[in-house]
Amino acid sequence: MIHSISVLAQLAGDASAGPKPGGVVIVGFLFVVIVLALLASVTSAIGAWFTKQAAKNAAQAAAAAKSTAEAFSQSASAGSASSAATEDSATGDKTDTETDDSALMAVIAAAVHTVIGDRPHRVVSIRSSGPGWAQEGRRQIFSSHRVR
Amino acid sequence: MIHSISVLAQLAGDASAGPKPGGVVIVGFLFVVIVLALLASVTSAIGAWFTKQAAKNAAQAAAAAKSTAEAFSQSASAGSASSAATEDSATGDKTDTETDDSALMAVIAAAVHTVIGDRPHRVVSIRSSGPGWAQEGRRQIFSSHRVR
Amino acid sequence: MIHSISVLAQLAGDASAGPKPGGVVIVGFLFVVIVLALLASVTSAIGAWFTKQAAKNAAQAAAAAKSTAEAFSQSASAGSASSAATEDSATGDKTDTETDDSALMAVIAAAVHTVIGDRPHRVVSIRSSGPGWAQEGRRQIFSSHRVR
Amino acid sequence: MFDLLHHLYENTGISHIDWRMLVMWLVVAGLLYLAVYRKFEPLLLIPIAFGALLANLPTEGIVEGMEFAGQHHPMKEDGTGGLFYYIFQGIHLELFPPIIFLGVGALTDFGPLIANPKTFLLGAAAQFGVFGVFIAAAFMKYIGIEYSLQECGAISIIGGADGPTSIFLANKLAPHLIGAIAVSAYSYMALVPVIQPPIMRALTSVKERGIRMRSLRRVSKLEKLVFAVLIMMLCIILVPAASPLLFMLFLGNFMRECGVVDRLSKSAQNEIINIVTIFLGASVGITMDGTYFLTPQTLGILALGVLAFALATASGIWMAKLLNLVSKNKINPLIGSAGVSAVPMAARVSQVEGQKADPGNFLLMHAMGPNVAGVIGTALVAGFFMTVFG
Amino acid sequence: MFDLLHHLYENTGISHIDWRMLVMWLVVAGLLYLAVYRKFEPLLLIPIAFGALLANLPTEGIVEGMEFAGQHHPMKEDGTGGLFYYIFQGIHLELFPPIIFLGVGALTDFGPLIANPKTFLLGAAAQFGVFGVFIAAAFMKYIGIEYSLQECGAISIIGGADGPTSIFLANKLAPHLIGAIAVSAYSYMALVPVIQPPIMRALTSVKERGIRMRSLRRVSKLEKLVFAVLIMMLCIILVPAASPLLFMLFLGNFMRECGVVDRLSKSAQNEIINIVTIFLGASVGITMDGTYFLTPQTLGILALGVLAFALATASGIWMAKLLNLVSKNKINPLIGSAGVSAVPMAARVSQVEGQKADPGNFLLMHAMGPNVAGVIGTALVAGFFMTVFG
Amino acid sequence: MFDLLHHLYENTGISHIDWRMLVMWLVVAGLLYLAVYRKFEPLLLIPIAFGALLANLPTEGIVEGMEFAGQHHPMKEDGTGGLFYYIFQGIHLELFPPIIFLGVGALTDFGPLIANPKTFLLGAAAQFGVFGVFIAAAFMKYIGIEYSLQECGAISIIGGADGPTSIFLANKLAPHLIGAIAVSAYSYMALVPVIQPPIMRALTSVKERGIRMRSLRRVSKLEKLVFAVLIMMLCIILVPAASPLLFMLFLGNFMRECGVVDRLSKSAQNEIINIVTIFLGASVGITMDGTYFLTPQTLGILALGVLAFALATASGIWMAKLLNLVSKNKINPLIGSAGVSAVPMAARVSQVEGQKADPGNFLLMHAMGPNVAGVIGTALVAGFFMTVFG
Ligand code: NA
Ligand code: NA
Ligand code: NA
């Protein structure tokens, strides 16, 4: 990288007496473009890997979700569980594609179904319990009052 | 101002040896009263100017609101638009008296009417989009999800 | 306390050449246990006093609540007032056992009853007005708009 | 190992407790009682009381490096200071009071003052509470309690009923009195509903108390913005020494009123003022070392404080009556007492007293005018003292 | 007593007002008008304008101890500095810009950039706005306005359309120009919807503006986390001088995306950034002392700033057209202009212009890619200048 | 121009990367994985991990002026320090841990401890984890890892399972070990549900685990307030060195319980603790420079940490069994393990284990007593070490 810049840099002439505006501009702009191009390639590489993984995981997750759901609640219509899973992938940003999260969601959906029965329902939001000491502490204190 | 204080200040006697309590109190209290009186006059002057402007603007705004509303939506009953404008001036604090804001409100009211039709409605709140980088950024990101 | 530690401290042998690990551990652990035991005793003492006071106050409060409620609103069923008082003691943490607070609550309950009449109601929450300058200031400004 | 035990015992604070500490513990208990159960300005008095308690316990890592009341606590061995050496810089460098004023500005509605500028004069008159007590403090030497003129200035500002301004001025003119002055100012501010009504009733007739005032005109956003900028400029030009307080006050107020920076205005009203209040209060308390606090000087400050509040109340009322002699639109003299500041307690007292005379009379908004004028007035008085004595 | 009056008069600031202050008051009024009524970046411009007003009033207790524009204000008599001596340390010690970046990171979604990494190149191209203006600034000497190379660097970064980065670099290379550079950067950022569209339309055909882009793939949480960590590492390794900004940016972003520290992420997005913004803005303003601000140099900066924005816009568009020559998935050149940063205004302009050409075309998310790439790019350029001139 | 290129290359950090950095990158990746996907105390571990990553990258403007682990980084040329030179002052000057304790106090309900003061002794017993490991650390020299007594003290406090206290003490006694100690403390706190249960089951019989405890009496507001003030006073008098931590803890708690300063209490629970947590965490991480972190000493700390947790757990249980020999109201020994602190994880473990033995048994509130007693106990132990070695 540095070498290829240096070839171009020749164009800006002699720089023995401190940096000259022309040299600074040519070197600087090329430098920035090349660094950002490098970042772009790295990002592309990450993306390629993840896209492949995501495809693989999605297939696995769907299978896992279905079987787990059935295992947990024979009476639950498999439809509601898989629709929850579908919604999961549609919701986007907030869910990661890890198998265990999808599976967990299917389990929860199935459990909800078992409790609520056939009345129409939809898992709108599942929030993992924040594990911070402080938040946790407060939540515990509050919930403990109910426990008692 | 300084001169008129100095006349009164004579009463407090000689102050050659540093400030004396009596002198400090007389000069100080008069000074504060005079400064605040000055602030009072300035505030009165501002108020007088604004009161005159407000009267002028109110008349203009009402007219502008009416004509704009009619221009935009022939089918909209002029009543709903002007009632919005009235509400605007009644709501007080939050709206400034600038003509273009009132006009904008009338336009919005008319547009709402066109969409909603004759069913009873009321423009409860029109909020200008906060222009801050951060707030903006977040709002954009959220709204963009819907756009997509 | 210091004396009893010193007896045990002998076990750790000579410490003429700066602190030795053994000495530090024995003295340190005993020190901590003894200090915390002291804190435990103080806390117990505080608790004993308060438990006694609470019993006394509870009796007084119940009486006070009943009489105040009757005094204020002949038509109010004493039941609603005392149920409010009961709720008070059940709510726990947030209320202190001071007589005047309970009495105040009974008064409020009675007053509410007078206004609302026989329709079923329940005092869900009574919040003392936060006395802070700032909070206060803002609240005043807001409520003053309604006053005007 | 005996060495260790001896070292440990010497390092407990038991041997350092003296009777003055015990007295201060009682003072702290009193302050906490007033704050929690009498709701005396608890936002400040609780941190102050805890700071005062800490100042009267044998601590380590708290006051190292601090210098107050003629006593210099040396730095820790590693060259760093104690916890409050750093927190107290917020007062020493005069950062906390202006930052509190940023929040106060964001919480203040100057509308009533703008709608009725005459009430500026009520706020001005109430400053006589400050100057009257300045004289009184100077004369205390005749009963054996001597204050320097600087100290007189710092003490008399209690009559301005404005906590941050009092702390700001005291740090400049008499840093060793900060604790007493702040406690006195906040306590009497909380006592406004007790101190003012008898004076108000004594100085007004029933007829005067029944005066109904014209309802205030609406003030537009632009007018409020122009007011904030122009008044700030005027105040700073006339009393440059008050710049830090008044700049922050009006910056906060502009952010509040302009309507386009709500997130900044809300931060000023909440996070910023809350965080600073805790540290300001505790820093004030830490100066209340019993050795220096329990002196006739301190008791004198408490006595002078209540006098200041009474004088300020009275002079606000007199000014209102004076204005009624020359003005067509009559002012209810009950709002004069609100010029003392103590926002918004004093205004509420005006409202309550007004309704006692005439239940249909609503003075609250009218009283907010002199109330906020008093804040500006007291900041200017502080600037005046700093110019004369600083 | 005459002494006292004389002293008092001398201490009012009336005698210190000169014509440059009056001119600056007008500038401040203009800035406030733009901020409040034209909604030009009010979060920064209101504090800046108030700071600038304060800088042009005769104050006490504000600038003592500060040193800017060749002028050294001595400390106060007690050895402490004025209020802004301390607040300004946030800029002088380069703390505020990185902390703002913590919040910006917590507010930024890099998803669109990750889904379409090619848009990194649009963000890179837009940096030509910076370098082009660097040359222009160096050549200004031929029309009588001479800037040192350091000054050229600080000025040209305006083309990066990134406030905190501009302030960060200006503090390093040309501290006396901070005020002018920040005002210029924020004003032009607000003017993006005015400056960009004509250039965008001039450089693109109707057909190009109508290009519909493939919708972006979803990016998983893990991918966003890996991106944040790796890109941060690469940037710091390649341009260490940009470490403070980029570290904070990606720490904030990681906290946002990881989903397990919401309370920290929300604090970064709100309290932290709000508090710092107020003090950053006012600190920038305080440097705008009329004596030094009203020079041809300053006017030159305003002229160069608009040139920088125009150049950045154009070069972003050219790069998009260049990429279309070699790439299968066509890029709508309208999103090239978003590479200028000015998040998210520039992206919104792309969206609006795109819909003018084809109402069914939604470019917003696509434009967010170059938009956030531009933030990274400008931070790297700042690092480059710091390496070369620092 | 070659000069420029050469200069540029020399200023990239590529040449400064060595193998220890690479190892530390893996450590950071591990920490981030644990924090995000295993939810190991992410509030602290994420900032720590980012700080550690930064410490192992070739940066500029970050560590200038810092001095840790025998290495002194010179100031920048303009005499200012790097970003973390300033942020780290929060640890160096011992400001962050007390401020965190202000928030912890505002988040803590001492009710269960007040209702059952005997549980103070369980919190005391658990401190044996600290002292046991102190001995163990001193004996490590026999397997080739030598720690000074100061270092032993700093390391052993990990057994107190209290992050801010560990950092506070480590800064005093062994600043070069802060990173390892903090990481160890927070990691093992997160591992409490893994470390404790086997020990709990091994040391108790099924019958003991089934003990049902008398339900706790209600504690009035006044009692909580009296408790906070008196216990604070006692602790400070007996262990003055722990003043900064315990003062802040009980000030926060008083604000929480008094009910009249909710806005301050909420600020302490949210803004203040969040802001400080970010900067505290990153500051801790920045000390984890690979050159000094990757030593047998550090590995030793990890080993000693887990031993400390195990010992603390066991001694809490033994103390509960001991108390049952002399007391009428039986204590379920499962709550003894909660004396280790690690609020509220350890209490939750007690609850879970109790329900395994008897599903109708609710130990959570009972376990909160020793849990918060452990916090006080560990602060006192820290004070003890500071007195003996400081
Ligand atoms: Na006042
Ligand atoms: Na940019
Ligand atoms: Na502990």
Image (cartoon, coloured by chain):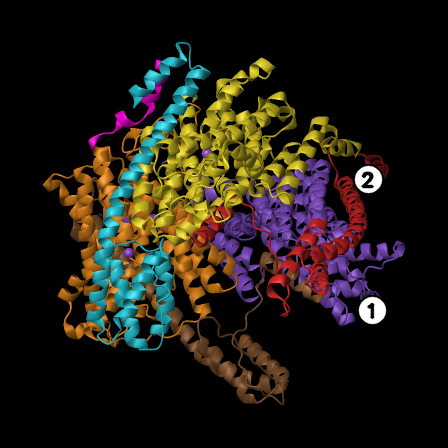
Chain colours: A red, B brown, C cyan, D orange, E purple, F yellow
Compare residues B26 and D145 and report the one nearer the observer: D145
Compare residues C48 and F28 and report the one nearer the observer: C48
Circle 2: element type: helix
Give the residue drawn at x 41%, y 76%.
B51
Q: Chain of mark 1?
A: E
Give the residue drawn at x 50%, y 49%.
E279
Q: Which residue is mark 1?
A: E206
Report crowding for label 1: few under 14, some 14 to 19, many 20 or more residues within 10 A (C-alpha): few
- Dot 1 amino acid type: Val
Predominant SS of the magenta segment: helix
Q: CA distance from mark 2 to mark 1?
A: 38 Å
Q: Chain of mark 2?
A: A
The answer to whether F210 is drawn above or below residue A87 in the figure is: above
Q: Position of residue F388 (x, y in %)?
A: 41, 21
Q: Which residue is mark 2?
A: A12
Give the residue drawn at x 10%, y 41%.
D143
Q: Which residues are magenta?
A: D1-19
Decide if residue D387 is in sight here. no
Q: Position of residue D200 (x, y in %)?
A: 18, 64
The answer to whether C19 is drawn above or below residue C43 in the figure is: above
